[in-house]
Amino acid sequence: MGIVSQFSQTQTDTSSEMNTTIPSAAVDPRPSVSMFLIREAFHSVFGGLVALVAVFLLSVYTKPSSRRILPPGPKGVPFFGNLFQLMATPQPWKTFADWGKQYGPLVHLNIAGKNMIIMNTHKVAADLLDRRATIYSSRPNLIVASEMLTGGMLLAFQGYTDLWRRMRRAAHEGLNSNAAKNYHAAQEKEAILLVQGVLKDSNNWDDEVKRSTASMILGAIYDIPTVESCHDPQVAYVNNFVNRFVGAASPKAHYVEYFTWMKYIPSSMAKWKREALEWYKRDSEYLGKMYGAVKGRLRNGEESTSFAASLIRDDKHLGLSDLESSWLAATIYAAGSETSSTVMAWFILAMIAYPEVQKKAQEELDAVVGRDRMPTFADRDSLPYINACVREALRWRALTPMGAPHETVEDDWYEGYFIPKGTVCFANQWAMNRDTDVYGADSDEFRPERHLDQDGQVACPYPDTHDEGSLTLPRQLWFWSEVCLDRTGSYCSIMTYISRICVGRHVATNGLFINIASLLWAATVAPVTDHEGRPQIPDTFDHINNGLVLRPIPFKCNVKSRFKGAEAIVSQTRESFHS
Ligand code: HEM
């Protein structure tokens, strides 16, 4: 890491070579000045000569390498830059949003010599992460989390490497919009079990939501039969595995990430290194066994549409070893389980705080589905309000407030500012999702209507927001967005950007749709009341940060059957999955 110790509102970097391909947005106003001078040249020969010299001088003195102005940002201290400011802030996304107001939508930080930029608006994030995806799609290397603990095998942590491309392609083949339909039946079944679970004991709603998402995703990946409890040993192991690398990836976890020479300390003298390498061995063995079990079942002639089965069947064409495939399968669980259950938790909180939204959603369900059967995926296109609830649940309280870090693979220029190769980039989703210029003055409120057009249909997403707009895309565009996935990306709320766009977004939004539709069809979610009968509505901003996501603080709610006979229909529908 180079050390940058100069900080001011306009910071400069003269350390690396000039970029040869300057993207158009980075080009300064020189062309218009040049055009003016060239026009003048037509007026006289002497004028022409003067103009040519002036153009030459302009190009020499204003060429990018001589004025590499970094984006503005807060002043740091020598050697450490803004490191201590970053370490001291408990909710960096809020501090970054404040800095955004002070310094502009693109903020630069220096973290002990490493350049970092924060994008605070959809426009800047889309300009850089989407429109210049080839430069902005790598990941910073984390010595403990990505090299030692996960041996470079964790898709979500990999840089722009050949292994990432192979794994990403395999993940896309197993989780794209068509492949995601393979999991519809499992998702419908899990949604019913979720409804039964919360109706039986609403005090336990949070565990039930966690159990149901873990069960759905483990089933989709490994064909594991329904998980009965969120304390199931297999779920517990995989959750601990996730917690381990999420913890290790936290900016405050390991000094070696800032002082990289520490990685050469022998294992015998460094407990953190010894433990990380040991866990990599143990996890590889455990994940290998889970993957191997699917292989064994296929060998015995069993049918399976699971994700692991698709990796096994296509292993030659996908070019992944067993070790790589077993880690990929586990990464899908890691990335999909906690995230999906957390969106559901925020949604349940929203239903307590916004009963009028719940009522409207239930009116739509009554009108479209009726009360004689439960909703299914076949109803999805006829339920715009429920689909808008899915989008709003993803937007309302950004559960991954800073997204995942990206890293630039070459020097770049944006709006006259220099962004050096190796810069770590964060899209501040927390700020973007509540941008009042985009979502209006009520952006803190849960209001699904903001995603509907005047005909009550799901609207096209706001420009650059990546709101989940697939429902309104014409078919050919849908196809195009899938085909071009790794170049142009797709349309999803906080699950993006572009070549790193959340590869599980179809599975995720499908799961949210069916869970929300089933829950609101069968039940009413209400706040608990105090001894005087006053409803207890928790603070909808309060959260717990587990390193991977922000979850609402634990709260109680009352889940009651919505109409007579609802529970019986839920049970009958459950039975039909056995027949
Ligand atoms: C609603 C729940 C979900 C949310 C909010 C979410 C969000 C995200 C975000 C913010 C990223 C990082 C994107 C970037 O780097 O710009 C991501 C990546 C990823 N997500 Fe999701 N996700 C969700 C569900 C899922 C599900 C269900 C799966 C799998 C079935 C999944 C698999 C992945 C994977 C494998 C990556 C890493 C992609 C890569 O680095 O190339 N996610 N997700």
Image (cartoon, rainbow, N blue to C red):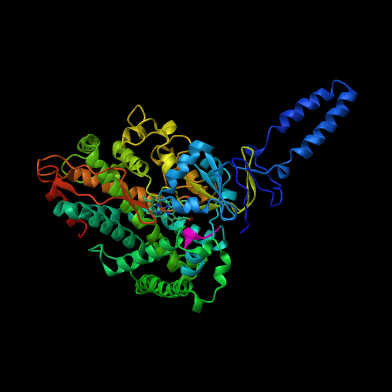
Residue 27 position in % (x across, y down): 67, 37
Relative to 81, does residue 354 appear above or below in the rendering? Answer: above
In the image, the segment drawn in magenta is 153-159
Judging depth in this view, the residue of 321 and 562 nearest the camera is 562
Q: Is residue 481 visible?
A: yes
Residue 523 position in % (x across, y down): 17, 45
Q: Residue furthest toward the top?
A: 43
Residue 311 on the magenta segment = no
Image quadrant occupied by the N terminus? bottom right
Residue 227 position by quadrant: bottom left
Q: Residue at x 50, y 63 (%)?
A: 255
Q: Is residue 153 visible?
A: no
Judging depth in this view, the residue of 565 and 96 nearest the camera is 96
Q: Residue at x 55, y 69 (%)?
A: 262
Residue 465 position by quadrant: top left
Residue 156 on the magenta segment = yes
Relative to 518, does residue 144 appear above or below in the rendering? Answer: below
Image quadrant occupied by the C terminus? bottom left
Q: Is residue 372 left or right of residue 210?
A: left
Q: Is residue 534 left or right of residue 352?
A: left
Relative to 399, does residue 449 appear above or below in the rendering? Answer: above
Q: Residue furthest toward the bottom?
A: 268
Relative to 142, does residue 101 appear above or below in the rendering? Answer: above
Residue 102 position in % (x across, y down): 51, 37
Q: Residue at x 27, y 65 (%)?
A: 225
